[in-house]
Image (cartoon, rainbow, N blue to C red):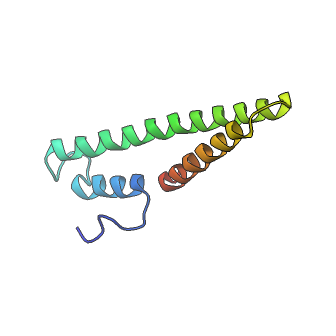
Amino acid sequence: MSNALDNRPLLVRLQKRIEKLDPEGHTGATPVDVELHRQSVALVNELTAALKLIRENLRACQATIHLAGYFDPAYVNDAQAAMKVADAVLAKTDA
C-alpha cells in the first residue's frame, strides 16, 4: 500500500487498481473487489459532475448579483469562497 496516498488523482489511482486487479476484464481479483472499484469510479464521476453544476450556478448567481448593482458584498464573498472550494476539489479529480 505504499502508493495508496500518492499524489495521483483519485480516478487515476482507482483505474490503475482496476487494471491491476483485473487486467483482462475477467480474471484476477474477486469480482467484488473489481466491482467496488468500478462503482467508486462511477460515484466520483457523478459527484464531479454535480460539483461542476453547483460551481457554475454559483458563478451565475454572482454575475447576476453584480449586474443588479445592489447587493450585500457578503453574498458575493460567500459565493467566491464556495467557488474556490469547488475549484480545489475539481483540481484533485483531474476533471
Give the residue displayed 29% in from the left and 64% down from the top.
Answer: 4
Q: Residue at x 61, y 38 (%)?
A: 55
Relative horizontal placement of residue 94, taking residue 13 as reference (left or right): right
In the image, 80 versus 52, the foreground residue is 80
- As drawn, which residue projects farthest toward the bottom? 2
Question: Could you tell me which quadrant the N terminus lies in?
Answer: bottom left
Tell me the residue at 26%/51% (across/down).
Answer: 24
Depth check, front residue: 8 or 76: 76
Q: Position of residue 5 (x, y in %)?
A: 33, 65
Q: Residue at x 50, y 50 (%)?
A: 89
In this rendering, the answer to whether 2 lies above or below 67 is below
Residue 7, relative to residue 17: is it above or below? below
* Residue 30 x %, y %: 13, 47
**Residue 81, percent from left and from top:** 61, 47
* Left or right side of 88 for 35: left
Q: Residue placed farthest to the left in the image?
A: 30
In-front residue for pair 52/41: 52
Q: How many marks?
A: 0
Q: Residue 42 falls in which quadrant of the image?
A: top left
Using residue 8 as the reference point, say whether residue 24 is left or right of it: left
